[in-house]
Image (cartoon, rainbow, N blue to C red):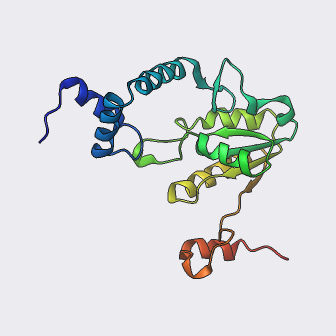
Amino acid sequence: MTAYSPRLQRLIEALRRLPGIGPKSAQRMAFHLLDRDRNGATYLSTTLAEALAGIERCPSCRMFSEDGHCSYCSATRAASGQLCVVEGPADLLAIENAAGYRGRYFVLMGRLSPLDGIGPKELGLDMLAARLADGTVQELIIAINPSVEGEATAYYLAELARAHQVAVTRIAHGVPLGGELEYVDGGTLARALSGRQPV
């Protein structure tokens, strides 16, 4: 077993907290920052500290924002009457950059997973219920990934919206553009068939 100095060990452990970074990758990053890019390491450290101090969750949509300003909660967006629920910030940005959607969002920061201790409270669904109750939302768009937990979350969201007499829609799932049927998994193909549209 390799013995690192205490500070180097802590740096490697800190880098391993990043998603997709294993022990070897963390070691490689640490060695690179210490040996070849100390200026980059300083910049990373400073930028991370500034981000932690200045970025918070928007109290309305739960997306990351700074200086108390959230560009996704403007009055123009509210006028659409649409509210799109996504699992995380990356999903919001994917929709924002590709779909032409210009309504409001609500970011769950996860999905229902009772085995992991993630219930409605952890996802801020009490905040979402208050938004649905205030009368400004005419359509709740569910944009949740089609996993087992995602399906349970989508069902819960749909029931919550119906309880507040809000129309519910869900983004389509199925065969990707340019995909070939022989390579599409059975679950995706079944969903595509059941969600077929008239032409």
Quadrant assignment for the C terminus: bottom right
Quadrant assignment for the N terminus: top left
Q: Position of residue 3 (x, y in %)?
A: 13, 34
- Residue at image position (62%, 78%) is 180
Q: Position of residue 193 (x, y in %)?
A: 68, 77
- Can residue 178 be seen? yes
Direction from residue 118 to residue 1 in the image, left or right: left
Q: Quadrant of residue 16?
A: top left
- Can residue 162 be seen? no
Direction from residue 11 to residue 47 in the image, left or right: right
Q: Position of residue 91 (x, y in %)?
A: 62, 47
- Residue at image position (86%, 41%) is 80
Q: Position of residue 73 (x, y in %)?
A: 76, 31
Q: Nearer the viewer, residue 25 or 118?
A: 25
Q: Nearer the viewer, residue 30 or 16?
A: 30
Direction from residue 91 to residue 165 in the image, left or right: right
- Residue at image position (51%, 59%) is 148
Considering every residue shown, the one lying at the far front of the view is 36
